[in-house]
Image (cartoon, rainbow, N blue to C red):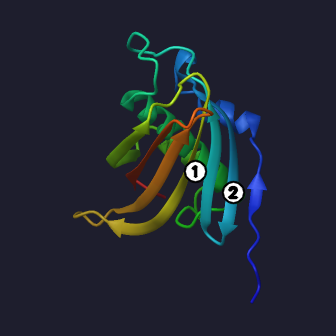
Amino acid sequence: MTALLAVEHPTDEHLLARVLTPYKDHCKYLRSAVVVSEAAGQASARCEFTIPESCYIDDTGHLNSVEVNICYNQMMYYLVAKSVKEGLLTGFESWTLDDFWKHQLPDILIARFAANFRRPVNPRAFCGEMEFRSVTRRALADGSPFLHAETVYRYWDDASGRCDGKAVLAFVNVP
């Protein structure tokens, strides 16, 4: 039996900056992302985040659900963009980076999002990872295609803080 080797793609600073362009400067929390392709058509990301101050509320002292969602979005957008660029993720074989930029905001939807807070996570410095568990091509009632993706994620810090969850994505108006 042949062992599958994981291939790591270090942070692409130019791509990361472009992925974060839609965010206001004080809401760009993703600092680095290493994308790992473990098997044909599968990819995950290991990321570092920092949230100097909350963008909407007084300091809670811990990562909260709004920030979890924002960080998830940034991590997911980067993972998809890097996967498209490197040809890593099943379901996106026909996409170009131009397709990603066109679809990034209007056509990538979170259909379901769940978070489990196990121990408070320090928002000033923490890590996260996510992976696509499945990507399948489906059709809406009108016959138009979309991609349905099941993902999992988790965050942690140096003080044993922990948060994890699942998200289901819909990529509509796909090429």
Residue 18 shown left or right of residue 51 in the figure:
right
The residue at 50%/31% (across/down) is 121
Residue furthest out toward the bottom: 1
Q: Where residue 139 sits in the image (x, y, percent)?
A: 32, 67
Residue 3 shown left or right of residue 159 in the figure:
right
Q: Where residue 1 sits in the image (x, y, percent)?
A: 74, 90
Query: Regarding mark 1 in the picture, which secondary structure is present there?
Result: helix
Q: Where residue 147 sits in the image (x, y, percent)?
A: 42, 61
Choose between 145 and 40: the one closer to the eye.
Answer: 40
Quarter of the image holding residue 157?
Answer: top right
Quarter of the image holding residue 5?
Answer: bottom right
The residue at 64%/41% (across/down) is 47
> In the picture shown, does residue 82 fall above or below 124?
below
Check if mark 1's residue and mark 2's residue have beta carbons within 8 Å: no
Residue 36 numbered mark, or none: 2
Q: Where residue 98 sits in the image (x, y, percent)?
A: 61, 46
